[in-house]
Amino acid sequence: MTSTISKRERGHSRTAPWTFLTNHAHVLICLAQAPAMRIQDVAERVGITYRAVQRILNELEDAGYIKRGRKKEDARSNEYRINGNLPLRHPVERHRSVSKLIELGLPDRN
């Protein structure tokens, strides 16, 4: 299920509307939905540049929130593992784990 911000959702503004979650959260949610998603696909889905996704992935990896590995069937592609046990970073939400954040972005299983 791929979704991008439409012109209608943007309204008359030339910038994307504000959201409750950061781009870091959006990238994590994308990777939780598809651990082998290509960087350019993450960028399109989140609505940011390829370079911004690279920077976010580096920051998440440096902080221990994700681990990168090569896909077994295609050594040219990355696969990402999320450490869902780590706490969120801001003091207001530090009592919650990354896995709780990811639950927000995953479809309900009814």
Image (cartoon, rainbow, N blue to C red):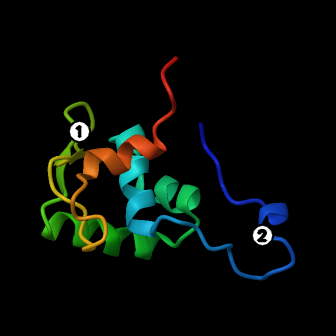
Residue 83 seen in the current view: yes
Question: Residue 81: horizontal and vertical position, in percent?
Answer: 21, 45
Mark nearer the viewer, 2 or 1: 2
- The disc at residue 84 is none
Near-viewer residue (47 or 76): 47
Identity of the residue drawn at 33% across and 70% down: 56
Against 37, residue 66 (above or below) is below
Q: Say whether residue 79 is visible.
A: no
Question: Foreground: 81 or 11?
Answer: 11
Residue pictured at 61% horizontal, 43% vertical: 2
What residue sits 15% from the left and 55% below the top?
86
- Compared with residue 72, is residue 88 higher up or lower down, i.e. above or below? below
Give the spatial CA distance, label 2 vs label 1. 36 Å
Left or right: where 11 falls relative to 62:
right
Where's residue 98, x and y in %? 26, 52
For marks 2 and 1 on the same chain, the one whose residue lies earlier in the sequence? 2
Dot 1: few (<14), some (14–19), or many (≥20) neighbours within 10 Å? some
Please provide percent x and percent y for residue 63: 14, 68
Q: Secondary structure at mark 2?
A: helix
Q: Quarter of the image holding residue 18? A: bottom right
Q: Nearer the viewer, residue 96 or 52?
A: 96
Q: Quadrant of residue 93?
A: bottom left
Direction bottom: furthest residue: 14
The residue identified by callout 1 is 71
Q: In the picture provided, is 52 more to the left or to the right than 68?
A: right
Q: Are marks 2 and 1 in contact (CB under 8 Å)?
A: no
Image quadrant holding the N terminus, namely top right
Residue type at numbered disc 2 = Arg
Residue 36 in the image, given as x and y percentages of width and height: 34, 42
Q: According to the image, label 2 marks what residue?
A: 10
Amino acid type at image mark 1: Lys
